[in-house]
Amino acid sequence: MSLMYYIGAMEIKKAINYGLDALKLVLIALAIVIPVRLLIFQPFVVRGQSMEPNYHSSDYLIIDEVSYKLHQPERGDVIVFKYPKDPSVKYIKRIIGLPGETVEIKNAEVFITSQGNTWKIDESYLPLITQETWRNSANMAPTTLNANEYFVLGDNRNASYDSRAWGVVPMQNIVGKIVFRLSPFEALVKE
């Protein structure tokens, strides 16, 4: 009977050790994943057509929340931000105008004026069909950005509700920059 008792006690001890090891593994994983998720990266799911053809509705994206603590956003960055008129809503758009610049749209071309120089920006990320056909606010009077303000546009200009309609995005509203796309799988293969 003592041998059976000994074997049973060993099995119980093994089960307890196994359970403790599994619990340690889960705690270590959570200690790594939770801070990364809360402080560095955040998921975002695209809703709507404003960024087509580069990003589609239901695309699952990862946002880098740290980069803009280290350096300023740049023209062309695709960002997620809190909508200035309702911060509970998040949008995805592309940065077009930077602090201190003046943005103007003439004949569906975007012009930037900074320090007395004016130039048309290169929007090679837009497909030719979008460049030729966007007509929603194809002309826009100059908008001058103050410090810490950004002018954003959707890539699908005909279907985008953006700075042309509601104004600039303050720096404090920017959540982060898109760093990669997790889904759909076809997009991962192409990138």
Image (cartoon, rainbow, N blue to C red):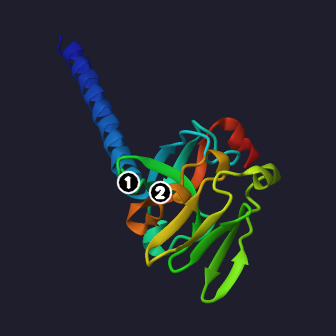
Residue 72's disc number = none
Dot 1 amino acid type: Lys
Which residue is found at the position 81% from the left and 49% from the top? 129
Of 14 and 146, the residue lying toward us: 146
Q: Earlier in the sequence, mark 1 or mark 2?
A: 1
Observer able to see residue 109: yes
Q: Which quarter of the rendered picture does the N terminus lie within?
A: top left
Query: Is 190 drawn above or below residue 105 in the view shown?
Result: above
Of 96 and 16, the residue lying toward us: 96
- Residue with the most extreme bottom position: 116
The residues bearing labels 1 and 2 have C-alpha atoms spaced at a distance of 8 Å
Q: Quadrant of residue 84?
A: bottom left
- Quick check: 60 left or right of 166? right
Query: Looking at the picture, how far across and down is residue 139, in whole percent?
Result: 66, 62
According to the image, label 2 marks what residue?
Answer: 166
Which residue is found at the position 63% from the left and 80% from the top? 113
Classed neighbour count for the residue bearing mark 2: other residues with Cα under 10 Å, few (<14), some (14–19), many (≥20): few
**Number of numbered discs on residues:** 2
- Asked if labels 2 and 1 touch by Cβ distance under 8 angstroms, the answer is yes
Dot 2 amino acid type: Trp
According to the image, label 1 marks what residue?
Answer: 85
Which residue is found at the position 26% from the left and 19% from the top? 7
- Quick check: 158 left or right of 34? right
Indicate the secondary structure of the residue bearing disc 1: loop
Query: Looking at the picture, how far across and down is residue 15, in whole percent?
Result: 29, 26
Indicate the secondary structure of the residue bearing disc 2: helix
Query: Looking at the picture, how far across and down is residue 182, in whole percent?
Result: 59, 43
Of 102 and 90, the residue lying toward us: 102
Q: Quadrant of residue 36?
A: bottom left
Observer able to see residue 78: no
Which residue is found at the position 77% from the left and 50% from the top? 133
Query: Is 95 drawn above or below residue 57 in the view shown?
Result: below
